[in-house]
């Protein structure tokens, strides 16, 4: 990891975190878009800028981790790919967009969430946003239009059972809304386990509401994401390394087989398989720089409906290695912390003299790490069936998980070995398991 210039002492900026909370609420709840008078307000950009300036000015230490560098490495790749594929200015625009809507949020969340209390507050904001989306969707189910300005159900709106709910901003697609709901399931379960009677009752209601909301989205990928979380939880907490590795390799194949079976009765599923294969061909024809960011639709006429295939087709081997490596490295680190949170036998670190509250804080951090790990798994599963490679949701939750890793290493420095750049480099190879598995399944089935 690379250290930026910093003061010797730590400084946590309450001002920066305050505006990060406002930014989170504006992105997820989007209150400014609920009224005609404020719909054009640029509150999201203003809050992000203030939070960034405050972080750079008063947050210490400031560090860049491999995830940051991997995203930064995508910027020149996107620009070069655009020029080589005849869309130079568009490539530059996409690179700028990546910096603003992906790199900056990742940096802010990974830097400013310096305590469990801060993380809890942001998790509550996420759950509140989910409940508002579900209630708005419930109104859409009966009246087509929700109470949030201009939000309406999509699909066969004349048939209530075929209506698919939406929300404001980038949640205007049922699949994005469903992805967000799945990523909040671990948050609700976390507060249920930690809370007292009233909290447990509240979280049970929230969990039931999320299940209802997932049903209202009508998204098969979302339903698979919710079910997949249970399977992954079992594998992570109970399965041995061999079973886990086998499951990771076979999961993309199984998902492709499921999509293939659906294609026999659903034309949209058949189109998804064709798009996946088209993405593989784009990668094989343009292995270095791909077809250019944003050009998948131009080449095929449809998006890939698969975040992994989409990135590989548009950005080639280097681009997918950086993007996929970023995800894989973060998940691997989280998994190592889950499995190896205790001090190894060969470590010389003496933890017997540490205060009890430090040990309790460490266990709380481990529990929070597992929760955030599962939320990111929720993105991985749902993202396998839709193209949301650079959605802001990914970088909000990725930043939260990275911040958890930073706090864990601060408490137990010996865990720093799991955030080593060597693991990050290997992760850039491990991420290709998904692409190779899909390709093998497609070759066998098409």
Image: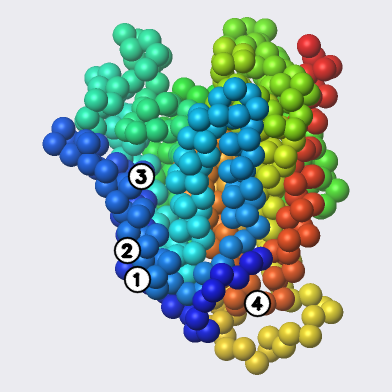
Residue 368 in sight from this viewpoint = no
Quadrant in which the C terminus is drawn = top right
Is 200 rendered above or below residue 5? above
Residue position marked by numbered label 2 in the rendering: 18
Q: Which residue is drawn at 79% across and 80% down?
A: 347
Mark 4 neighbour density, 10 Å: few (under 14) some (14–19) many (20 or more): some
Vertical placement of 271 versus 151: above or below?
above
Q: Distance between the residues labelled 3 and 1?
A: 20 Å
Between marks 1 and 4 in the image, the one whose residue lies nearer the viewer: 1
Number of residues whose C-alpha sits closer than 10 Å to that of mark 3, classed few (under 14), some (14–19) or many (20 or more): many
**Percent position of residue 318, x then y:** 72, 39
> For the residue carrying disc 1, how many other residues have a C-alpha within 10 Å: few (<14), some (14-19), or many (20+)?
some
Q: Could you say which quadrant of the image residue 77 lies in?
A: top right
Q: Mark 4 points at which residue?
A: 412
The Cα–Cα distance between marks 2 and 4, rounded to whole angstroms, is 28 Å
Nearer the observer, 116 or 35: 35
Q: How far apart are marks 3 and 4 (CA)?
A: 33 Å
Q: Is mark 2 on a helix, strand or loop?
A: helix
* Image location of residue 425, percent across then percent down: 76, 53
Write down the residue under mark 3.
27
Q: Name the residue under label 1.
A: 14
Q: Is mark 1 on a helix, strand or loop?
A: helix
Give how far across and how far down residue 33 sits, in percent. 24, 36
- Whole-angstrom CA distance, mark 2 to mark 3, is 14 Å
From this viewpoint, which residue is outermost toward the bottom?
A: 353
Q: How far apart are marks 1 and 4 (CA)?
A: 25 Å
Q: Are marks 2 and 1 in contact (CB under 8 Å)?
A: yes
Q: Which colour scheme is used?
A: rainbow
* Secondary element at image label 3: helix
């Amino acid at each position: 990891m690379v250290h930026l210039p910093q003061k010797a002492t730590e400084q946590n900026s309450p001002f920066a975190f305050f505006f990060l909370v406002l930014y989170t609420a504006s992105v997820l709840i989007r209150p400014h878009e609920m009224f005609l008078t404020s719909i054009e307000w640029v509150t999201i950009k203003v809050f992000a800028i203030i939070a960034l300036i405050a972080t750079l000015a008063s947050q210490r230490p400031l560090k860049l981790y491999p995830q940051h560098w991997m995203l930064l490495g995508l910027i020149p790749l996107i620009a070069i790919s655009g020029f080589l594929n005849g869309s130079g200015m568009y490539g530059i625009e996409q690179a700028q967009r990546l910096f603003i809507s992906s790199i900056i949020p990742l940096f802010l969340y990974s830097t400013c969430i310096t305590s469990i209390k801060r993380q809890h507050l942001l998790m509550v904001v996420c759950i509140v946003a989910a409940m508002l989306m579900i209630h708005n969707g419930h109104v859409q189910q009966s009246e087509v239009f929700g109470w949030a300005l201009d939000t309406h159900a999509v699909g066969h709106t004349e048939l209530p059972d075929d209506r698919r709910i939406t929300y404001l901003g980038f949640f205007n697609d049922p699949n994005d809304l469903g992805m967000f709901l799945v990523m909040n399931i671990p948050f609700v379960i976390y507060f249920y386990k930690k809370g007292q009677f009233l909290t447990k009752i509240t979280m049970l209601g929230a969990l039931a509401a999320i299940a209802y909301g997932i049903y209202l989205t009508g998204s098969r990928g979302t339903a698979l994401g919710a079910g997949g979380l249970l399977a992954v939880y079992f594998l992570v907490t109970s399965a041995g390394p061999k079973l886990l590795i086998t499951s990771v390799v076979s999961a993309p194949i199984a998902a492709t087989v499921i999509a293939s079976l659906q294609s026999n009765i659903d034309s949209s599923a058949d189109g998804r398989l064709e798009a996946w294969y088209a993405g593989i061909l784009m990668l094989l024809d343009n292995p270095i720089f791909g077809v250019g960011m944003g050009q998948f639709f131009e080449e095929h006429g449809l998006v890939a409906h698969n975040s992994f295939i989409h990135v590989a087709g548009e950005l080639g081997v280097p681009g997918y290695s950086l993007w996929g490596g970023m995800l894989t490295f973060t998940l691997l680190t989280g998994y190592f912390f889950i499995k190896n949170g205790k001090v190894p036998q060969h470590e010389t670190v003496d933890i017997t003299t540490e205060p009890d509250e430090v040990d309790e804080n460490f266990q709380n951090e481990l529990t929070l790490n597992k929760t955030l790990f599962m939320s990111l798994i929720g993105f991985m599963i749902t993202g396998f069936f839709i193209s949301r490679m650079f959605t802001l949701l990914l970088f909000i939750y990725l930043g939260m998980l990275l911040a958890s890793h930073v706090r864990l290493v601060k408490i137990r420095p010996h865990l720093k070995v799991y955030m080593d750049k060597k693991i990050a480099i290997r992760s850039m190879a491990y991420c290709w398991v998904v692409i190779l598995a899909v390709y093998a399944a497609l070759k066998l089935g098409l």
